[in-house]
Image (tube, helix red, strand yellow):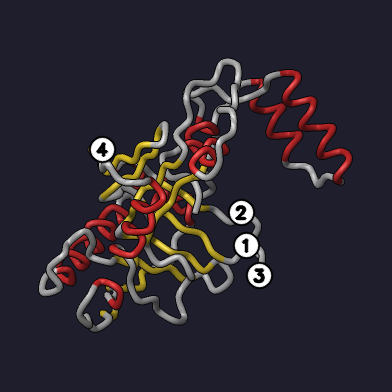
Amino acid sequence: MCDATEKGENLTRGLHVREIAWLEPHIAAARLRPLGELAFLDSAMRHSTLGRYSYVTAAPFGRLVVEHGKSYWNGEHTGKDPLYELAQLMRRFSHQSHNGLPPFQTGSIGFFSYEMGQLIERVPRPAAAGVGPVPEIMLGFYDVVVAFDQIENRAWIISSGYPEKDLSSPLARARERAALIEARLALDVSRARGPAPPIPRSAGARTLNKIVTKLLSRVSYITSWKEIYSRRMWPSASSPIFHLAMIPGPSI
């Protein structure tokens, strides 16, 4: 366990870090899911350079959503230019990084949709049959993350203490939040160390899974996705696959 020294403004803010006993990332995801707004960044292929790290986090302290050119922070319209607002938030919630740890050490997770292009240039809004409006930007801001080194089988809880502004108290919040996450991870861990239970899938989702998990050449990849599109084999909004892909803040 270690704490970085706080040095004035948020730009040099440190982190609270504690190493925990190893557990599989998917087990951690199951333990943290009840906290809400789970984000699971999973490197399923364990490889020293291509799939070394995985991350699990939940319960963001803030969310930036940009819809129709308007930015909203935790549901309230900011009245600011969306890209300016994003830059301000990134600056406000920045911190020092720790060497020797997985590179993502808390921060924002989400997506920039194709519709974001309308914030930069005037282009027609894309139309997708059967798909509702998609925000230009959706980012969750997470103050705690469980980071996994899948080569060394090591895991850490990393906590920033945000959104606490007073530098005399963020360390207390960081420790408290890390303790909460550690307690959640300890639930039923002894029984959860076996293989992950199978996830029920519809026939369409099983076919989709079979196609996209093959080792494909470029040509067969394009052919397969044309087949997927023509059959409309997309998971339903209630399926586990959909929730893994469309959790608020699904990717860095």
User: Does residue 131 appear to the left or right of 108 in the view shown?
Assistant: right
Question: Is the residue 245 above or below the residue 43 in the image?
Answer: above
| Disc 2: CA contacts within 10 A as few (<14), some (14-19) or many (>=20) | some
Judged by depth in the image, the label closer to the viewer, 4 or 3, is: 4
Q: Residue at x 29, y 66 (%)?
A: 159
Query: In the rendering, at what x and y percent does residue 234 appear?
Result: 62, 25
Query: In the rendering, at what x and y percent does residue 92 appear?
Result: 28, 63
Judged by depth in the image, the label closer to the viewer, 4 or 2, is: 4
Mark 3 element type: loop
Query: In the rendering, at what x and y percent does residue 182 appear?
Result: 28, 60
Distance between mark 4 and mark 3 Cα atoms: 41 Å
Q: Residue at x 38, y 46 (%)?
A: 82
What mark, if any, has residue 44 been given in the picture? Answer: 2
Q: Tell me the quarter of the image containing the N terminus.
A: bottom left
- In primary-sequence order, the first of circles 2 and 3 is 2
Q: Which residue is mark 1?
A: 51
Query: In the rendering, at what x and y percent does residue 243 appear?
Result: 47, 34
Q: Which residue is mark 4?
A: 77
Question: Which amino acid type is marked by label 1?
Answer: Gly
Question: Which amino acid type is marked by label 4?
Answer: His
Mark 1 element type: loop
Distance between mark 2 and mark 3 Cα atoms: 13 Å
Mark 4 element type: strand
Q: Residue at x 55, y 33 (%)?
A: 241
Distance between mark 2 and mark 1 Cα atoms: 7 Å
Specify the quadrant of the image occupied by residue 227: top right
What mark, if any, has residue 223 been given in the picture? Answer: none
Question: Which amino acid type is marked by label 2?
Answer: Ala
What mark, if any, has residue 49 been given in the picture? Answer: 3
Mark 2 element type: loop
